[in-house]
Image (cartoon, rainbow, N blue to C red):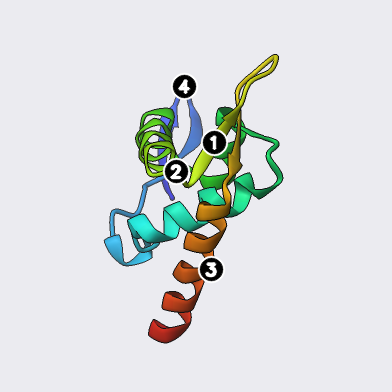
Amino acid sequence: MRGKNVGGTRAAIQVYNTDLRYMPPKRSKEQIITQILDLCKGGDAGKTKIVYQVNLNFQTVNNHLELLLEKGLLETIQGEKILYKTTQRGEEALESLRIIKEIYS
């Protein structure tokens, strides 16, 4: 913290650390897909829930949802709002992703 006189009072100014060693590693596409498929298993995940639980922005979630729907790993449940549910094929893919993770961990 550095101090600066403001109107006769010393105010604290926070200096942000720009050292990149403290940034968490970037998640792989497979990690993100695993999180989305796992979250949608119950069929009660709307887009906003996915954004916040998986910690992504709406554009990135839209791209992943489009891919997962296109590949048949997710399906939509139409209602008051659109919900996403992991399909049987998605459950199988999720299990495969977990096995791969175990191999490389």
Q: Is residue 16 left or right of residue 88?
A: left
Identify which amino acid the numbered label 4 is placed on: Gly
> Taking the image as drawn, is residue 27 in sight?
no
Eye-nearest disc, 3 or 4: 3
Residue matched to label 1: 75
Q: Is residue 48 left or right of residue 67?
A: right
Eye-nearest disc, 2 or 3: 2
Dot 3: within a 10 Å radius of its alpha carbon, few (fewer than 14), some, or many (20 or more) residues?
some
Q: Nearer the viewer, residue 31 or 6?
A: 31
Identify which amino acid the numbered label 1 is placed on: Glu
Mark 1 vs mark 3, CA separation in Å: 18 Å
Mark 4 vs mark 2, CA separation in Å: 63 Å
Q: Are marks 4 and 2 in contact (CB under 8 Å)?
A: no
Q: Give me the residue at 62% from left, 48% from top.
A: 39
Residue matched to label 4: 7
Q: To which quarter of the image does residue 63 belong? A: top left
Q: Give me the residue at 65% from left, 49% from top.
A: 41
Q: Are marks 2 and 1 in contact (CB under 8 Å)?
A: yes
Residue matched to label 3: 95
Classify mark 1: helix, strand or loop: strand
Q: Give me the residue at 53% from left, 68% from top.
A: 95
Q: Nearer the viewer, residue 7 or 24?
A: 24
Mark 2 vs mark 3, CA separation in Å: 15 Å
Classify mark 3: helix, strand or loop: helix
On the rendered image, what quadrant is the C terminus found in?
bottom left
Residue matched to label 2: 72
Query: Residue 81, position in %: x, y?
Result: 65, 18
Eye-nearest disc, 1 or 4: 1
Mark 3 vs mark 4, CA separation in Å: 62 Å
Q: Are marks 3 and 4 in contact (CB under 8 Å)?
A: no
